[in-house]
Amino acid sequence: MLKDITLGQFFPGSSPIHKMDARFKLILTVAFIVMLFMAKNKWGLLIGAVFTLLTFLISRIPFTMMWKSIKPIIPLVMFTAVLNLFFVKTGEVLFEWQFIRITDEGLDTAVFMVSRIVLLIVGSSLLTYTTSPIDLTDAIERLLSPLKRFGVPVHALAMMMTIALRFIPTLLEETDKIMNAQKARGSELDTGSFRDKVRGMIPIFIPLFVSSFRRAEELATAMECRCYHGGEGRTRMKQLHITYIDWIGCVYMAIFIAGVVAANIIIQS
């Protein structure tokens, strides 16, 4: 299960989306998330699904990665669906038994919310799939650079965010190794009551915290040995440049935004 979590992983490639400026990709990802929440009907989400599918095709990321992005959030998706299915009481009753009551509006709301969450996760994951951690750090720092006037340590914030994102796969791999080691020693992590399973997590969390602090110390030492002193006087080997691909991506996003807005207006009218 832990191996299926792909958050923070980068897949090198030569697709147009890989070649886009990281700043544009960040802005377009935020715009995509905003438009998903602005979609008020199923047609808006359908446009979002088509947009996400086409973007995956353009990025040439394997569709197995799409499934791996969804798989870890299945419990959250199911919980959201159950809440909307059983707690929305308005509309025509489709099924009723004792205290359980399912209506057509509850079913529509459950499908709508689940679709929104899935599209949100899948679409947002393309940012890390197609952007290297270094480019992502530079993009965040450039976009937040106006805050330097107010004394905000922009470079430090960007570096912390990127390091945290970069080390998610590493920590997941370390957790998987610790769990396998504990199972080899006879620990039963998947059996017993809920209380037993919680207790079984203690031999996993303790070495994981120790390993995390050790890795953090090693990283800090390595950065100090390389004379890293923050963003002051720092130069960049690779500069971010805006190309025609970025403007094509903006037009592509504008079409998606126009489609969602049109769906909201037409359905309401």
Image: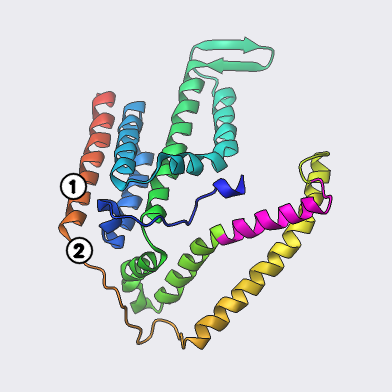
Quadrant of the rendering where the C terminus is positioned: top left
Residue 78 in which image quadrant: top right
Badge 1: few (under 14), some or many (20 or more) residues near its Cα, within 10 Å? few
Residue 120 in which image quadrant: top left
**Residue flagged by tag 2: what amino acid is it?**
Ile
User: Which residue corresponds to mark 2?
Assistant: 242
* Relative height, residue 175 to residue 123 (above, below): below
Seen at 60% across and 16% down, the residue is 101
Quadrant of the rendering where the N terminus is positioned: top right
212 sits to left or right of 252: right
* Relative height, residue 140 to residue 11 (above, below): below
Which region of the structure is painted magenta? 170-188
Seen at 54% across and 58% down, the residue is 169
**Residue flagged by tag 1: what amino acid is it?**
Val
Mark 1–mark 2 CB contact (< 8 Å): no
Residue 244: x, y in percent? 15, 57
Residue 149: x, y in percent? 33, 78
Q: Who is closer to the viewer here, 211 or 38? A: 211
Structural distance between the alpha carbons of marks 1 and 2: 14 Å
2 sits to left or right of 187: left
Q: Is residue 135 magenta?
A: no
Badge 2: few (under 14), some or many (20 or more) residues near its Cα, within 10 Å? few
Residue 216: x, y in percent? 60, 73
Q: Main secondary structure of the magenta part?
A: helix
Closer to the N terminus: mark 1 or mark 2? 2
User: Which residue corresponds to mark 1?
Assistant: 251
